[in-house]
Image: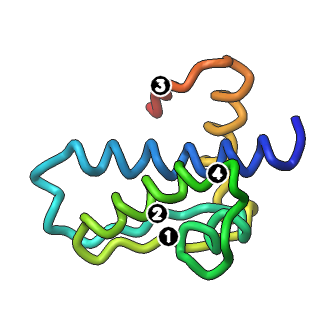
Amino acid sequence: MGIQDVIFAELLAIMCACELFGSKHDLASRPITFINDSKTTVSWVSGCIPGNNSHDQVIGNIRSWLDSFYLAVVEFRPRMTNSFADILAKKGLQSGTKELWWSVS
């Protein structure tokens, strides 16, 4: 998997999280923080650095979602502090599906 594929996967993860949060109407008025371990991805969706043209549509969709939420931000956190999300992302990539269900007991 090349770096652009990883960046695209990070963008899709943020977009799917936005879609999930947006589908929960009872949460619409609450602040939300989306955490990601890719500085590039966080910069692109935050509008700090122009994104790659091939990702503009996804970045635009994410920005639209963020604008529609009350106090929504995307923050960078190093991978070592975000290990559970990293495990889920790797499992999702290995399974070849966009949907991954994880049971924590």
The amino acid marked with disc number 1 is: Val
Mark 3 and mark 4 lie on one chain; the one further toward the N terminus is 4
Q: Residues within 10 Å of mark 2 (few under 14, many from 20)?
A: some
Mark 1 and mark 3 lie on one chain; the one further toward the N terminus is 1
- Provide residue 72's location: percent of width, then percent of height: 35, 71
Q: Residues within 10 Å of mark 4 (few under 14, many from 20)?
A: some
Horizontally, residue 63 falls left or right of residue 42, namely left
Determine whether label 1 and label 3 are within 8 Å by CB.
Answer: no
Q: CA distance from mark 2 to mark 3?
A: 19 Å
Mark 4 and mark 1 lie on one chain; the one further toward the N terminus is 4
Q: Quadrant of the N terminus?
A: top right
Q: Residue 55 shows which numbered tag?
A: 4
State the residue lying farthest toward the right.
2
The residue tagged 1 is: 74
Q: Secondary structure at mark 2?
A: strand
Q: Is residue 90 above or below residue 82?
A: above
